[in-house]
Image (spheres, helix red, strand yellow):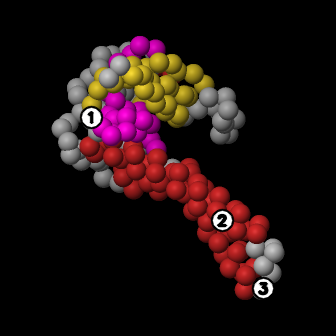
Amino acid sequence: MITCGWCNTHYQTWRSKCDACGGPMPPPPGQELGPPPPEVPRDLPSGYAFRTRFLNLPVLLGMAFTGFFGLFLVQVLKNGQWLLALLPGFFLLGGLSCLRYGWTKASGILRAFRRGIAIPGKVASVSLDTTQSLNQKHPWKLTYHFTLDGRLYEGVITSFDSTLAKRAAGQPLWVLYVEKDPTQNTLYPPLKYF
């Protein structure tokens, strides 16, 4: 099964463009680099920016912790239990930190998609990520590299999409990086749904 990295639509066979969102699909595993990304500014398929910003795990956890422990902190302070307020205050700060991390990471990805500079990269490795699991299944972890001004940069994609497993080390792919900070980079088209 092939999954659109823009909208999570599943297909039995590969196609060049997603029927649901209109986004370009990545070349099938084992093929060449594929066509280059369009010129900047790039338009993103409908809803992709929202899903990238709000439906990533750190942002979701951050919002949950911030909301729950924020309300808890208000209630504790209303009751005048100042010492007890340290506990929800600590978790509230953790939630805000998690929210900020997820938002910053998503913003970097969107910046790379919209205005990033395209450069050829290569798959460095593909393996099961045994540090995570969902329903007793491990996601696939794809590591890619690209070289800019003699320096090697790395990116990592983690997804439950089994087509990642079919991509072999050395396979070329397009990388978009932010000019002022190449550590903010992403693959084009995306290989996973955020």
Which residue, given by chain and number where applicable, does mark 2 sit on? 92
Query: CA separation, marks 2 and 3?
Result: 18 Å
Return the residue nearer the eye: 60 or 109. 109
Residue type at mark 1 is Ile
Query: Which disc, if any, is residue 80?
Result: 3
In the picture, measured across the screen, residue 59 lies left or right of residue 84, that is: left
Give percent across and percent down for residue 106: 44, 49
Badge 2 local density, few (<14 within 10 Å), some, or many (20+)?
Answer: many
Per the rendered image, the range of residues in magenta is 169-194
Image height of 2 relative to 40, above or below? above
Which residue, given by chain and number where applicable, does mark 1 sit on? 117
Residue type at mark 3 is Gly
Query: Which residue is rendered at x = 66% and y = 36% of the image?
Result: 133
Residue 20 seen in render: no
Earlier-in-chain disc, 1 versus 3: 3
Query: Which residue is rendered at x = 26% and y = 43% of the image?
Result: 115
Give percent across and percent down for residue 109: 39, 43
Return the residue nearer the eye: 192 or 150. 150
Q: Please, what secondary structure does the residue beneath circle 3 have?
A: loop
Residue 141, quarter of the rendered image: top right
Query: CA separation, marks 1 and 2?
Result: 37 Å
Residue type at mark 2 is Leu
